[in-house]
Amino acid sequence: MGALKATAEALREQSIILKGGKMLLSMNQPDGFDCPGCAWPDPKHTSSFEFCENGAKALAFEATSCRVTREFFAAHTVSELERKSDYWLEERGRLTGPMRYDAASNRYLPISWEDAFALIGRELRALNSPDEAEFYTSGRTSNEAAFLYQLFVRRFGTNNFPDCSSMCHESTSVGLPESIGIGKGTVILDDFTHADAIFVIGQNPALVTLRPGALREMHWHPNADEWQYYIKGKARIGVFNTGPNVLTMDFNAGDIGYVKRNYGHYAQNVGDTDMQFIAVFRASRYEEISLSDWLTHTPPALVAQHLNVDEAVINAWLSDTPVAVPE
């Protein structure tokens, strides 16, 4: 429920509730478009909702109805804008026309498309060699626009394209071609089911196995969100947050789960075979607080009074039980 609420809030903030909702139904679909947020592999058989919370936010920023007009630039110098955060600048919206920097006023001033192209042409023709120019393009440029852009630059006589991937994704654009011959991942979700070994690098993973009928007690992680990939079996996950609100969902092999940091949750094997999933945390170490550990390290009299149970019951609860151990 938290992710759905955050998605709706992101669409509302950009004033695209109806437009954005329709676009989300086409994102990562066979006849739709890829998510602009990341390169997570697509499943072989898609559902109606093939996006995560961050993907929905990325789409909301792309399709925003907010606009940055010439009046905005007239009110702010470039020095003022440099002191603003990236988030604040993103929230202003999309440009409505070409602008050029004016050193005298330290502002971006509007310029017509004709004058903009004429200015670019004069600068390019004044170069001694086409290789003196670098043609930067944002990673948010559409594939169609980027294709036409590179045709123009190569016709001009150079292939200097230091785009965003050269800066943000060097390990992908350079490292992968040297290793596997292609600059992008080739994995699909179904590969996880058939792989003999899975190596997660740069994250903090935990392998969780539950026997049929077993229950992983209520716990929470204070230092990181939890991403789950279900390898086999049938799981039932309950997630609690302050409110109080609770969401219970069933997961099967190949499904992906997500639990926000500090949200209490439990896992239950509701199948007749072993249930197993990988839990991944973006943190330098694994941290967990279990309900029983929390209660047994609270003064027994206080717990007994609030839960209306005998202290003997509390003393029988397990404490200091290792929950994450190396295999």
Image (cartoon, rainbow, N blue to C red):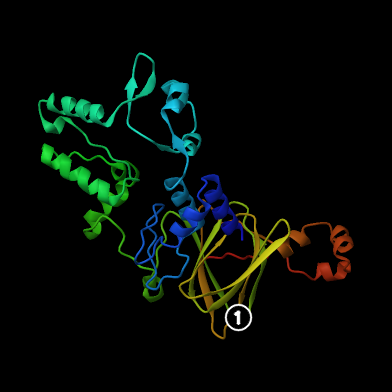
Task: Note whether 275 is above or below 262 in the view shown.
Answer: below
Q: Position of residue 249 (x, y in %)?
A: 60, 71
Corner quadrant of residue 140 = top left
Q: Nearer the viewer, residue 188 or 316?
A: 188
Q: Quadrant of residue 209?
A: bottom right
Mark 1 closeness class: few <14, some 14–19, many ≥20 residues within 10 Å: many
Q: Is residue 179 left or right of residue 6?
A: left
Q: Position of residue 55 (x, y in %)?
A: 46, 54
Can residue 106 be seen in the rendering of this structure?
A: yes
Residue at x 47%, y 43% (from the top left corner): 65
Along the viewing direction, whichever of 154 and 75 lies nearer the viewer: 75
- In the picture of the structure, the residue carrying the numbered disc 1 is 270
Against 100, residue 286 (above or below) is: below
- Give coordinates of residue 259: x percent, y percent: 58, 60
- Residue at point 41%, 62% (across, down): 26
Name the kind of residue labelled 1 in the image.
Val
Image coords of residue 177 (percent x, y): 23, 55
Count of labels in the image: 1
Residue lying at 28% horizontally and 40% vertically, measured from the top left: 137
* Residue 18 placement, left or right of 39: right
Element on which disc 1 rests: loop
Question: In front: 151, or 247?
Answer: 151
Q: Is residue 82 left or right of residue 133?
A: right
Q: Is residue 260 visible?
A: no
Q: Is residue 57 above or below residue 27?
A: above
In this view, 252 is above or below 166: below
